[in-house]
Image (cartoon, rainbow, N blue to C red):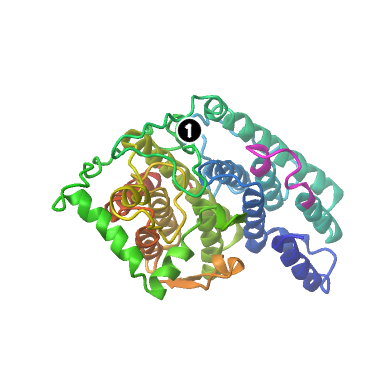
Amino acid sequence: MRIALLAIAAWLAVSACNTKNDYKEITSNPFLYSRTVKELNNVVMDNNFPPIIASRNYLYANIAAYEIIAAGYPDQYQSLAGQVNGFTAVPAAPAGQEIDFHFASILAFCKLGEAVTFPEGSMQFYVDSLKKLVKEHGMPGSVFKNTVAYADTVGKAILAWSKKDNYAQTRTAPKYTVIDTPGRWIPTPPMYAQALEPHWNQIRTMVMDSADMFTPPPPPPFDIKNKNSLYYKEVMAVKNAGDSLTDEQMHIAEFWDDLGTRLNVSGHVMFMTKKFSPTGHWMNIVGIAAQTAKVDFNTTVYAYAKTAIAMFDAFIQCWDEKFRSNTVRPETVINKYIDADWKPFLQTPPFPEYTCGHSTVSSSAAEALTSVFGDNFVYTDTSELEFGIKNRSFTSFRQAALENNWARFYGGIHFHNSCIVSTEYGRKVGDLINQRLRMKK
């Protein structure tokens, strides 16, 4: 049984000592929403979905939940209809029916979380457990029926909209053509996997006008033979840092690794280990922030939805540049021209180097979260404890994003110039989301 269900079971054991008519205390508790997002995070991880695709699950699931909150509390929140691309309407709540909008938002989240990518039923056991929970705590049959029906109505509308984002069409697009020329990306060890999602810039953006709305400057030109070139200095900076990492730098790199699926090789033995993706890590941070700030259920949903939108567009912006520049990874260059036995501290992911996906996404998420919780927000990120990696504390979301910037460099998988540019352009995406979206009234 997953951690989320165990946590709810423990909570239920306490609440069972109270009345049997306290279902509203349960459904309106922001902890329940955060645990539901964590459950989707587990499903994403268990199914080995890459971070770019995972961002799509978090996006539509959180928007479905947010739209129900906006419908139930129109004096506090405004629908995203007409604000995000292609989304023109959301079904109104039936007049005269009592609906538990908090519980409906959770059900809609689960429906979209699994239906967008995963096979139907991926979250069914979890949903059934929640339905049993609210019934046992006194939710009237009519309220339960109305709530489930409205969640299903909104969920179907969001699902229909999601299917027009060009995701299905990119499933059959041509594969990336590997051309082994100096400076161009080629697959890296130990998996030597094909380039991941080379057509992601064709996915419909949420707020950006287009995938190339924010086009970064080109990376330093490939010039490995000139020791005075900027490129050579960038390469040697990666190698020298990797050869002399401190314990603190290794902790930073591991903490922000978020590779998703890692192939471990020891002699003739190979095995896979799983972790969160960058989007999954930042979804956890949203929950930590909500709990730290002690905000209510509605604010929690709002924070998740806004952050998911920012990260989704950030990935599109980043992937547009990745497959424009097609930049080779440090590992490839160092092995070919400097040291054939050199290995980065982290495992190199399967796509071009410039720009850095994690730095872009982290910076965009930090801007979205800062708009909700404010700057100088002190919190401790406990996300990695379940993987045996100790906590890290931050004084702001922006500080966390900047640390991630260094993490990719320490890990040996990015040139630091890429991380710096990525942080800047991720911030541009986050700023755009903050400027254009009118969510909280």
- Residue 388 pos. (x, y %): 58, 70
Q: Which residues are magenta?
A: 113-125
Please name the amino acid that badge 1 sits on: Gly
Quarter of the image where the N terminus is located = bottom right
Hey, which quadrant is residue 171 in on the image? top right
Q: Nearer the viewer, residue 416 or 24?
A: 416
User: Please, is residue 196 above or below residue 339 in the view?
Assistant: above
Hey, which quadrant is residue 146 in on the image? top right
- Residue 273 pos. (x, y %): 60, 57
Which residue occupies the extreme left position in the image?
228
Q: Is residue 52 left or right of residue 12?
A: left
User: Please, is residue 124 above or below residue 323 in the view?
Assistant: below
Residue hosting label 1: 82
User: Please, is residue 162 above or below residue 44 in the view?
Assistant: above
Q: Nearer the viewer, residue 144 or 249?
A: 249
Hey, which quadrant is residue 370 in on the image? bottom left
